[in-house]
């Protein structure tokens, strides 16, 4: 299996990790062809996670906006409240197959941390989650959930104290104890084979969406839309439409305060090629190649890079990468709450912002599917603080 996506991807890691990565790749490729592994994963996704997740026609929102019909892929209804558990369940089964007794993971918004703590409890494994101290403060409900599930949360204060720094710390930890510890990466990034296996575990999103849209609408959608930080929920959605170029695949990055301000987390739209966290990809860097601190109202998108396959898709114009700013994401959050009674995660609200912006440009025959990657319970205090700071009504 090729570990590169064009010039992107690869395995830029210290020698101490090459053996662990080789073992992981071999185990995954064997498990992928093992009917018993697939059957157990499918059973857990159905009976524990609650798949398949619904495809929901947002009728009131669509009528309010005029134009396109907007459908929501309801990953927020999965157990733990986001798409993350699709991947953590698969990787936890790999960890058990490899005889690992301990899981570690990085997290930003906390949903991957919660999903990792959940599968660790389910399989009786030790669990430690690395989380930037900034995110520990702004995602306190998820920190409490991780503790309740038996995980230890290590608050990282170095650098910008967000997702990048949590991943740095997790990689260092893994290098010191990979013989008994499994590093469960949460996004379609990092060294090979992580981008490949995360995509495969998340591809259930796109495969279900494709079939559900054919059943509900009699045809495929015109656009599928997902937020992009590292890019796991987007690459999972995109995977269902790789052979249908007529379906426009749209990733939406975090524009923060605006690309021109430098206060954003839009790696494809505002970055350049570099190497970090074991891979070559687009990263936000200064003129000397040093990684920049990022900014987004959304903790889960507050990362200076993006997965390698997204970089290739952008270069080859096989997918389009747009930007939504903080104010657009918060407005989209409010709009979905008021018109559909659904509280979206701030990450997902960036994808919604694009759909809200785009829908009025089309007629009723145009179908947009938004991957509602997570629910927004975790973001309520963050939304309140944002509105108070900007003088908006609560």
Image (cartoon, grey):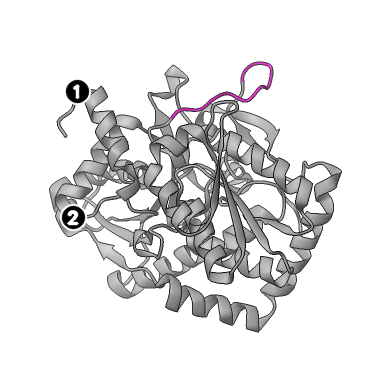
**The magenta segment:** 286-295
Q: Nearer the viewer, residue 82 or 221?
A: 82
Q: Is residue 74 above or below residue 5?
A: below
Query: Is residue 216 placed above or below 57 in the rendered structure?
Result: below
Q: Is residue 241 visible?
A: no
- Viewer-proximal residue among 336 and 146: 146
- Kindly identify which residue carries mark 2: 341
Q: Residue at x 36, y 71 (%)?
A: 212
Of callouts 1 and 2, the N-terminal one: 2
Q: Residue at x 55, y 66 (%)?
A: 89
Q: Residue 55 sits in which quadrant?
A: bottom left
Question: In the drawing, does residue 17 fall left or right of residue 237?
Answer: right
Whether the magenta-drawn stretch holds residue 364 is answered as no
Coordinates of residue 159 in the picture (x, y in percent): 59, 26
Task: Tell me which residue sits at (26%, 41%) in the image.
Answer: 332
| Distance (Cα) linking label 1 and label 2 | 24 Å
What secondary structure predominates along the stretch shown in magenta?
loop
Q: Can you tell which mark lies on residue 152?
A: none
In the image, residue 300 lies at what x, y percent? 46, 42
Per the image, is 292 magenta?
A: yes
Residue 388 screen position, x and y as percent: 22, 26
Residue 160 drawn at (x, y percent): 54, 26
Residue 318 shows in the view:
yes
The quarter of the picture where the C terminus appears is top left
Residue at image mark 1: 391
Callout 1: SS: loop
Residue at 47% of width from left, 20% of height from top?
262
* Closer to us: 149 or 307: 149
Do the residues under discs 1 and 2 have CB atoms within 8 angstroms?
A: no
């Amino acid at each position: 299996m090729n570990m590169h996506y064009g010039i992107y991807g690869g395995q830029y890691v210290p020698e101490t990790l090459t053996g662990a990565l080789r073992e992981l790749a071999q185990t995954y490729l064997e498990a992928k062809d093992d009917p018993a592994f697939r059957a157990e994963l499918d059973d857990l996704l159905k009976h524990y996670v609650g798949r398949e997740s619904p495809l929901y026609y947002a009728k009131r929102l669509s009528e309010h906006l005029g134009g396109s019909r907007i459908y929501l892929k309801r990953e927020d209804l999965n157990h733990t409240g986001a798409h993350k558990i699709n991947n953590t369940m698969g990787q936890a089964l790999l960890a058990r197959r490899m005889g690992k007794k301990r899981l570690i993971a990085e997290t930003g918004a906390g949903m991957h941390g919660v999903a990792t703590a959940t599968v660790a409890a389910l399989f009786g494994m030790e669990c430690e989650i690395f989380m930037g101290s900034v995110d520990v403060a702004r995602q306190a409900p998820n920190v409490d959930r991780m503790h309740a599930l038996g995980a230890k949360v290590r608050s990282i204060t170095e650098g910008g104290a967000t997702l990048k720094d949590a991943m740095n710390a997790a990689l260092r930890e893994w290098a010191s104890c990979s013989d008994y510890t499994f590093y469960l990466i949460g996004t379609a990034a990092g060294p090979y084979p992580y981008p490949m296996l995360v995509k495969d575990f998340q591809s259930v999103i796109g495969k279900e969406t494709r079939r559900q849209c054919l059943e509900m609408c009699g045809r495929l959608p015109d656009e599928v839309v997902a937020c992009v930080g590292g890019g796991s929920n987007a690459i999972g959605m995109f995977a269902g439409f790789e052979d249908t170029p007529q379906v426009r695949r749209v990733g939406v990055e975090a524009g923060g305060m605006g690309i021109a301000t430098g206060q954003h987390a839009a790696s494809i739209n505002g970055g350049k090629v570099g190497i970090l966290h074991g891979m070559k990809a687009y990263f936000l860097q200064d003129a000397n190649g040093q990684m920049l601190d990022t900014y987004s109202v959304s903790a889960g998108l507050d990362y200076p890079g993006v997965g390698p396959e997204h970089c290739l898709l952008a270069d080859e114009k096989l997918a389009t990468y747009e930007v939504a700013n903080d104010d657009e994401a918060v407005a989209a959050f409010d709009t979905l709450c008021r018109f559909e009674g659904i509280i979206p995660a701030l990450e997902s609200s960036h994808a919604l912002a694009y759909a809200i912006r785009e829908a009025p440009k089309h007629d009723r025959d145009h179908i947009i599917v938004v991957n509602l990657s997570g629910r927004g319970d975790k973001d309520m205090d963050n939304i309140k603080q944002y509105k108070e700071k900007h003088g908006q009504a609560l």
